[in-house]
Image (tube, helix red, strand yellow):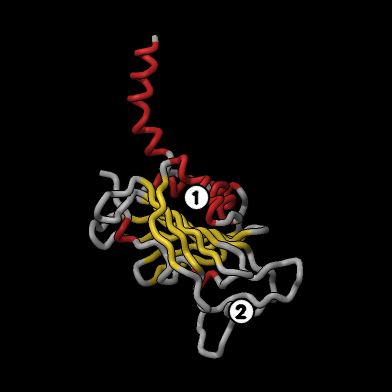
Amino acid sequence: MGKLYTLLLFLLAPNLQAHAQALSLDQLLYLRGKDVDAVNSYLSPKGWVFHDAAEESQSQYGTSTWAHTKQLYSGRAKSFVKLLAAEGYYSQVSYQTSSKVYYEAIRAKILAYKMVKVSAVAKDGYITTVYLGSNYQVETRLSTDSDTSLPVYSVHVAKKLPQGFMPAPPESTAEEETETEEETVSEVQPTLDLAESSLASEEVLMDSQVQHYK
């Protein structure tokens, strides 16, 4: 019996490891509200490894990136998670995967939560769709890997901005171009503008690093 149990674990291990890279919309919403240490503690037991980090600047979020099923030398992986954080601003989180199944599961949850589709645009090699819920804005994006021509699926989660907020960059100066939401209500923190700082910016996860399933 013990040998059979061990054999089953051995056979199931690759499947469990593969599914550990799958993140649901609820998990992304949870991670968005956590700091980098909490995100690392949550992802590490699931097989995610720290991949890269970039320091916050006056016009860009600081970023921390984790990879799942990462290749040793190429830097490619099956999936990536990126946490974007800036002092005084809401954090955001991006998830990129080569799995259509995981991506469609997130889109199904968006519909189940009755989030409203506010835009759908095909531009610069991407199909980008933006949804608004009562508290969050979710952006989904379909693109193509430049090396393999296979699809890459991305999801970006940000806090929904209160209506009437005017964009202004963090620690803004006249030279900066990145837009943010200006804080006008003490109970609500500001956040960088999604269109400038999420999947549309150079801070997004690189499509070329996503390794596809055969």
Which amino acid type corresponds to the residue marked 1 in the rendered image? Asn
Q: Is residue 141 above or below residue 181?
A: above
Quadrant the C terminus occupies? top left
Which is more toward the observer, 100 or 48? 48
Expressed as whole percent of the image width and height from the top left, the position of residue 73 reads 24, 53
- Quarter of the N terminus within the rendering: top left
Whole-percent x, y for residue 70 in the image: 32, 49
Tag 1: Cα neighbours inside 10 Å, few (<14), some, or many (≥20)? some
- 10 Å crowding of disc 2: few (<14), some (14-19), many (20+): some
Q: Residue furthest bottom?
A: 174
The kind of secondary structure element at disc 1 is helix
Q: In the rendering, at what x and y percent does residue 173 appear?
A: 56, 87
Q: Amino acid at mark 2?
A: Pro
Q: Is residue 126 above or below residue 48?
A: below
Residue placed most toward the observer, 169 or 116: 169
Q: Residue at x 72, y 67 (%)?
A: 188
Cα separation between marks 1 and 2: 31 Å
Which of pointers 1 and 2 indicates the residue nearer the eye? Answer: 1
For image coordinates 47% across by 40% down, the residue present is: 45
Outermost residue on the top side: it is 1
Q: Which residue is mark 2?
A: 167
Vertical placement of 92 versus 19: above or below? Answer: below
Label 2 residue SS? loop
Can residue 110 be seen in the rendering of this structure?
A: no
The first of marks 1 and 2 along the sequence is 1
Image disc number at residue 40: 1
Residue 11 appearing in the image: yes
> Which image quadrant for residue 134?
bottom right
